[in-house]
Image (tube, helix red, strand yellow):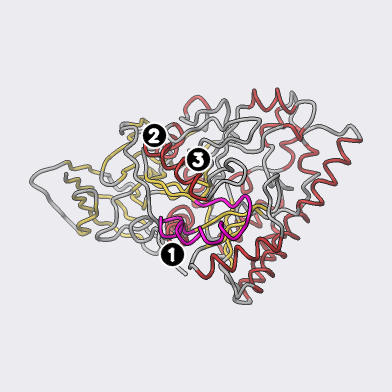
């Protein structure tokens, strides 16, 4: 029941120091120099970095979008997450049957995760329709540990603006967070119909039908709405553009209660990917779409400056084979989403810290500490402190890797980052004091993950 990590370089969101970590009964019990134990396991980290385990606040496991089901369930998805250094996920639940209760989806997802998940997990609520009963039910959902809820401004179950404002007001009164998929639906539909009518069906027209202004307009509307709802806490998921960032930056400077998340795909990839031949551009169909390359560095600057708080994945994996079958003749038929839960931390370390885009402390903050704080898990998660869960990742800063689909654990037939050369890679993952990944091999048990009853923070 004891695990002693010796000679590691501890990195938190604000410190770098060399001390040992003693873990007992799944918790961090001591941090200090020259610690010793008479019984238990001792691991010499030989100076490698030991950091709080990653917290991915945006995954989609078991997602059923009607025309397709995401390839990762709560077993394969959390194994992949763990192999990439992530020890906690917060999954965005998908839509349920028409007019279902909020608890319908929570109960379904908890049952799926309980038997399969190998790391700890929580859920964001999803609001697919609104009435008095749903507004009332939010209180019991918050008591059950669901302290953030997602509303969509697009897709079939989108909410109208006045409904979203009612959601914001209600959640704010409960101390909970409203998270928003921000895209202007009406313009997107108009553009999609125009391109299809003109026979413009290739993957690039997915991006052209969801231009940058549809995100920017939607973010502006939501920030203004949050202000009108007595500054209700607002979290913009998967921010994809520098112009959208500028809107958020201005709102934060005015003291607005707004937070932003981006994803590796918007930091590393751009819209030229949609032009790849043999329908390979379909791999990158996701919403919002990849943007022009100039947005990559603008988003990196947003992270460095603190205007983007978290980097999550929006992991939503559909096989390329299926995307081609459904979307090769019409981009609107292609399921939206891409994989990334396993590669997030390595990409952010190698290309963020390694390329001096962000500090090592900012890296820890955006992949672990900040999402834990924003979503009611800190300090049990996202920290290295006495009494915290012993959720840790060990990164070897000298380890060089080339991302190859064949070496990943994600249950999908491709990776968006094939061939990228990285320096610095997770070599050990510890969840509640148990070593569950060693040198890219999962050695834990199916179903060992626990449901996290999250706190309110507002």
Q: Position of residue 324 (x, y in %)?
A: 70, 25
Distance of label 3 from label 1 (alpha carbons):
26 Å
Q: Which residues are magenta?
A: 124-147
Is residue 137 among what the camera can see? yes
Q: Position of residue 271 (x, y in %)?
A: 73, 42
Q: Position of residue 242 (x, y in %)?
A: 69, 58
Circle 1 — which element? loop
Considering depth in this image, is 272 or 202 the residue closer to the camera?
202
Q: Earlier in the sequence, mark 1 or mark 2?
A: 2
Q: Which mark is residue 116?
A: 2
Considering depth in this image, is 415 or 339 the residue closer to the camera?
339
Q: Is residue 133 magenta?
A: yes
Q: Which residue is mark 3?
A: 341
Look at 77% across and 47% down and name the residue there: 210
Circle 2 — which element? helix
User: In the rendered structure, are the residues bearing label 2 and label 3 in contact, judged by CB atoms less than 8 Å apart?
Assistant: no
Q: Residues within 10 Å of mark 3 (few under 14, many from 20)?
A: many
Image quadrant in which you'd find residue 365: bottom left
Distance of label 2 from label 3 (alpha carbons):
16 Å
Q: If the image is split into quadrants, where does the N terminus sit? A: top left
Distance of label 1 from label 2 (alpha carbons):
27 Å
Is residue 399 among what the camera can see? no
Vertically, is 303 above or below 271? below
């Amino acid at each position: 029941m004891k695990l002693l990590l010796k000679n590691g370089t501890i990195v938190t969101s604000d410190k770098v120091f060399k001390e040992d970590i003693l873990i007992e009964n799944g918790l961090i019990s001591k941090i200090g120099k020259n610690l010793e134990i008479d019984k238990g396991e001792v691991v010499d980290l030989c100076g490698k970095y030991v950091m709080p385990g990653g917290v991915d606040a945006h995954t989609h496991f078991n997602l059923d979008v009607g025309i397709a089901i995401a390839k990762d369930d709560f077993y394969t998805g959390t194994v992949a997450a763990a192999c990439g250094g992530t020890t906690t996920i917060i999954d965005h639940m998908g839509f349920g049957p028409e007019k279902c209760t909020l608890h319908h989806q929570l109960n379904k997802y908890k049952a799926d995760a309980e038997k399969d998940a190998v790391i700890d997990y929580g859920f964001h609520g999803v609001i697919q329709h609104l009435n008095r009963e749903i507004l009332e039910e939010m209180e019991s959902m918050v008591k059950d540990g669901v302290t953030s809820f997602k509303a969509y401004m697009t897709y079939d179950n989108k909410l109208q603006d006045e409904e979203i404002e009612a959601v914001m007001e209600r959640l704010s009164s409960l101390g909970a967070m409203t998270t928003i998929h921000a895209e202007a639906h009406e313009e997107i539909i108009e553009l999609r119909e125009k391109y299809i009518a003109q026979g413009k069906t290739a993957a690039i027209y997915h991006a052209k039908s969801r231009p940058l202004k549809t995100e920017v307009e939607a973010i502006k509307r939501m920030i203004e709405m949050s202000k009108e709802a007595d500054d209700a806490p607002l979290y913009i998921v998967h921010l994809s553009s520098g112009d959208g960032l500028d809107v958020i930056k201005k709102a934060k400077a005015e003291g607005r209660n707004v937070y932003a998340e981006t994803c590796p795909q918007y930091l590393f990839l751009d819209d030229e990917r949609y032009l790849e031949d043999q329908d390979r551009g379909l791999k990158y169909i996701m919403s919002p779409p990849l943007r022009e390359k100039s947005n990559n560095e603008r988003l990196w600057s947003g992270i460095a400056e603190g205007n983007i708080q978290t980097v999550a994945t929006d992991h939503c994996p559909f096989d390329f084979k299926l995307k081609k079958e459904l979307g090769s003749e019409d981009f609107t038929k292609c399921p939206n989403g891409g994989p990334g839960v396993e590669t997030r931390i390595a990409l952010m370390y190698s290309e963020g810290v390694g390329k001096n885009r962000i500090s090592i402390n900012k890296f820890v903050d955006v992949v672990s500490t900040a999402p834990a704080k924003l979503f009611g898990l800190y300090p049990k998660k996202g920290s290295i402190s006495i009494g915290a869960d012993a959720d840790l990742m060990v990164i070897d800063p000298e380890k060089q890797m080339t991302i190859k689909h064949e070496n990943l654990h994600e249950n999908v037939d491709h990776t968006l980052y094939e061939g990228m050369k990285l320096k610095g890679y997770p070599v050990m993952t510890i969840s509640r004091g148990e070593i569950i990944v060693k040198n890219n091999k999962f050695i834990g048990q199916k179903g060992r993950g626990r449901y996290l009853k999250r706190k309110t923070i507002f």
